[in-house]
């Protein structure tokens, strides 16, 4: 012990902080500064500018020229290929045992890297650990203390068990911002990010949670920034419908990864998404149909959960 704190192992694992950057000229310097501000020492920075059309690339180069002696950096600037392809390339370029998923409009909070590394070292069966975030506006003013609770209205109690995390990821996606640290070798099993999708994070975490591979720490590890360009928060009806149709396709495609009662719960979620689509399309009868099926499947899920619990208690 030194100064009342436990000493880290001399073999501190390398963390690769992955930053996909796209048209975030206004925010990217804060993102990069936050990587240096985190006290975890064994880290590298891997950045890809995914075809930005503003001054994002110039800001990154200026920052690298100023800080290149302080942290190992790999930087690539290329044509736009989308977020999933960029994440797969970032992971392939990384040298670290652990990958910290970042975003060029958000930023890390000091202490998050160490807390997440400690969790994965203590839980070798877990492939990923997620934390919470604060929520800030485009000026950096804090809007919420908890992205999970205040923005997504999640029940953090669910995240205390594998069963609860599975239910939460399937039925109430509450992961806002770059809050995950993953083992690089886990990508060999879950096959990385799906490059056919526009918004790929739910699909990626469904594949992880199907292996009970996600852990949770109740620590705010990043600041999630809300601004007008957030893809998943668009107000355009057509774009929202397209996003929902993609999410519904993901739900139907990943049902086969789960056994009951979680298979039934994911079916229910696909109908709930269908109800949202019908609402936006102002189609009354499909809306009523999807809601009816959704409610019946949720009831079936609860019955199956109770039966499984009784069997476990009797074993």
Image (tube, rainbow, N blue to C red):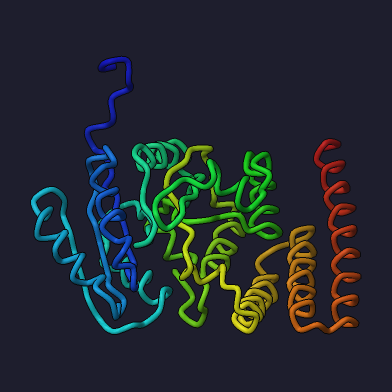
Residue 126 in view (yes/no): no
Residue 106 x, y percent position in the rendering: 39, 56
Question: Is 192 located above or below residue 262 in the figure?
Answer: below
Please state, as top left, top right, bottom left or bottom right, where the C terminus lies in the image: top right
Residue occupying image coordinates x 14% and y 63%? 62
The number of discs equals 0
Looking at the picture, tell me which residue is in the foreground, 133 or 216.
133
- Image quarter for residue 295? bottom right
Direction from residue 153 to residue 63 in the image, left or right: left
- Image quarter for residue 113? top left
- Image quarter for residue 157? top right
Residue occupying image coordinates x 81% and y 82%? 282
Looking at the picture, tell me which residue is in the foreground, 124 or 242.
242
Direction from residue 145 to residue 114 in the image, left or right: left
Residue occupying image coordinates x 27% and y 61%? 94
Direction from residue 212 to residue 227 in the image, left or right: left
Question: Is 82 located above or below residue 157 in the figure?
Answer: below
Residue 105 x, y percent position in the rendering: 37, 61
Residue 228 in view (yes/no): yes
Residue 237 x, y percent position in the rendering: 65, 80
Looking at the picture, tell me which residue is in the foreground, 50 or 309.
50
Question: Is 70 located above or below residue 290 in the figure?
Answer: above
Please state, as top left, top right, bottom left or bottom right, where the N terminus lies in the image: top left
Residue occupying image coordinates x 39% and y 41%? 112
Question: Is 296 located above or below residue 97 in the figure?
Answer: below
């Amino acid at each position: 012990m030194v100064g009342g704190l436990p000493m880290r192992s001399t073999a501190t694992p390398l963390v690769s902080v992955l930053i996909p950057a796209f048209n975030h000229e206004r925010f990217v310097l804060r993102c990069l500064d936050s990587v240096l501000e985190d006290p975890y020492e064994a880290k590298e920075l891997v950045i890809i500018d995914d075809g930005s059309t503003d001054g994002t690339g110039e800001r990154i180069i200026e920052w690298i020229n100023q800080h290149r002696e302080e942290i190992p950096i790999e930087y690539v600037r290329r044509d736009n290929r989308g977020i999933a392809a960029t994440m797969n390339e970032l992971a392939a370029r990384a040298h670290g045992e652990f990958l910290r998923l970042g975003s060029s409009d958000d930023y890390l909070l000091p202490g998050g890297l160490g807390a997440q590394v400690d969790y994965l070292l203590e839980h070798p069966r877990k492939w990923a650990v997620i934390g919470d975030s604060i929520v800030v506006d485009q000026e950096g003013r804090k809007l919420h203390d908890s992205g999970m609770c205040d923005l997504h209205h999640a029940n953090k109690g669910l995240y205390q068990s594998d069963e609860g995390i599975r239910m939460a990821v399937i039925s109430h996606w509450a992961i806002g911002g770059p809050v995950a640290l993953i083992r690089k070798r886990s990508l060999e099993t879950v096959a990385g990010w799906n490059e056919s999708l526009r918004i790929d994070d739910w699909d990626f975490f469904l594949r992880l949670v199907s292996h009970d591979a996600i852990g949770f720490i109740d620590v705010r590890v990043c600041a999630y920034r809300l601004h007008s360009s957030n893809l998943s928060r668009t107000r355009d009806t057509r774009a929202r419908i397209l996003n929902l149709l993609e999410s519904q396709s993901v739900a139907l495609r990943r049902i086969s990864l789960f056994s009951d009662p979680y298979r039934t719960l994911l079916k229910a979620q696909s109908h709930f998404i269908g109800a949202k689509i019908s609402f936006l399309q102002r189609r009354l009868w499909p809306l009523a149909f999807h809601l009816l099926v959704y409610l019946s499947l949720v009831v079936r899920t609860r019955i199956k959960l109770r039966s499984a619990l009784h069997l476990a208690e009797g074993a």
